[in-house]
Image (tube, rainbow, N blue to C red):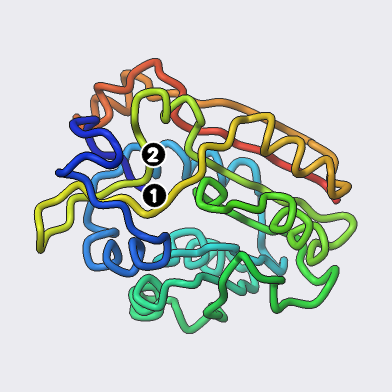
Amino acid sequence: MALRPEKDTPGSDATEILATRAGYDRWAAIYDGEDNPLVALEEPQMAAALGSVAGLTVADIGCGTGRHALHLAAAGARVTALDFSEEMLRKARAKPGAAAVTFVVHDLAEPLPLAAATFDRVVCGLVVEHIRDLRGLFGEMRRICRPEGLIVVSAMHPAMMLRGITARFTDPQTGRDTRPQSHPHQIADFIMAGLAVGLRLDQVSEHAVDEALAGRMERARRYVGWPMLLMLRWRP
């Protein structure tokens, strides 16, 4: 997921809203080349929440172009990564180190094609804001996680929607502000979905852009002090 300046409101003539899969298929061509303050904020938080993964089995649920999956595999994890965007997975498979990851095409609205209690870590990075049935996905992540494992979920903070921000990119072919469909979940929706399927909330934190990030990435400056990222860590 990435952020663009809040120049248009959803549904305006200058904005194109696409089904989530179609949106990410189109976004794949430029996804890795964009300066993305949300990703820059999220990646160190995800690494800290996961801890050492050497020798562990990890499922990356909604892997996109493989930013977490490839890093985890390089750190010594045995990684299985799922996404329903063929174009995002094509980008992931072309990257150095991709041969160490098992990539699977799969729609997260359906039961995960993974065996129960087989993963030490389950990662879901900047995905759940696109999922309508949170309980279904959280229940599947609990099912595949070992009893002693961890599930780490990151999401665009719901407060961003108060500024008219959802996942968006400028389509290089049309020049239009383009948005894969998102769902306006609140923090309580994420927490209650996990609790409803028997997960135990181990850690929750909110993160905003600070001056250090704004100094490295000018695009982030307009968001200084505003909640941008939500992190949730669960135990089965």
Quadrant assignment, res 111: bottom right
Q: Which mark is residue 38?
A: 2
Going by the image, does 165 lie left or right of 174? right
How far apart marks 2 and 1 lie (CA) works out to 7 Å
Q: Is residue 39 above or below residue 106?
A: above
Q: Nearest the camera: 12 or 47?
A: 12
The residue lying at 76 percent from left, 51 percent from top is: 150
Instruction: Please state which amino acid type lies under the numbered disc 1.
Output: Met
Residue 103 visible in the current orientation: no
The residue lying at 38 percent from left, 40 percent from top is: 166
Q: Nearest the camera: 124 or 53?
A: 124
Which of the marked residues, 2 or 1, is nearer the chain's N terminus? 1
- Of marks 2 and 1, the one in the foreground: 1
Residue 63 visible in the current orientation: yes
Instruction: Please state which amino acid type lies under the numbered disc 2.
Output: Leu
Q: Nearest the camera: 90 or 48?
A: 90
Structural crowding at the residue carrying mark 1, measured as other residues with C-alpha within 10 Å and reported as few (<14), some (14–19) or many (≥20): many
Q: Position of residue 136 (x, y in %)?
A: 73, 57
Whether pointer 2 and pointer 1 mark residues with C-beta atoms closer than 8 Å, the reply is yes
Q: Position of residue 118 (x, y in %)?
A: 81, 71
- Outermost residue to the bottom: 99
Quadrant assignment, res 24: bottom left
Q: Is residue 6 above or below residue 120?
A: above
Q: Nearest the camera: 10 or 188?
A: 10
Which element carries disc 2, helix, strand or loop? Answer: helix
The residue lying at 77 percent from left, 44 percent from top is: 194
Q: Position of residue 184 (x, y in %)?
A: 51, 37
Q: Which mark is residue 220?
A: none
Q: Which residue is mark 1?
A: 1
Structural crowding at the residue carrying mark 2, measured as other residues with C-alpha within 10 Å and reported as few (<14), some (14–19) or many (≥20): many
Which element carries disc 1, helix, strand or loop? Answer: loop
Q: Position of residue 223 (x, y in %)?
A: 32, 22
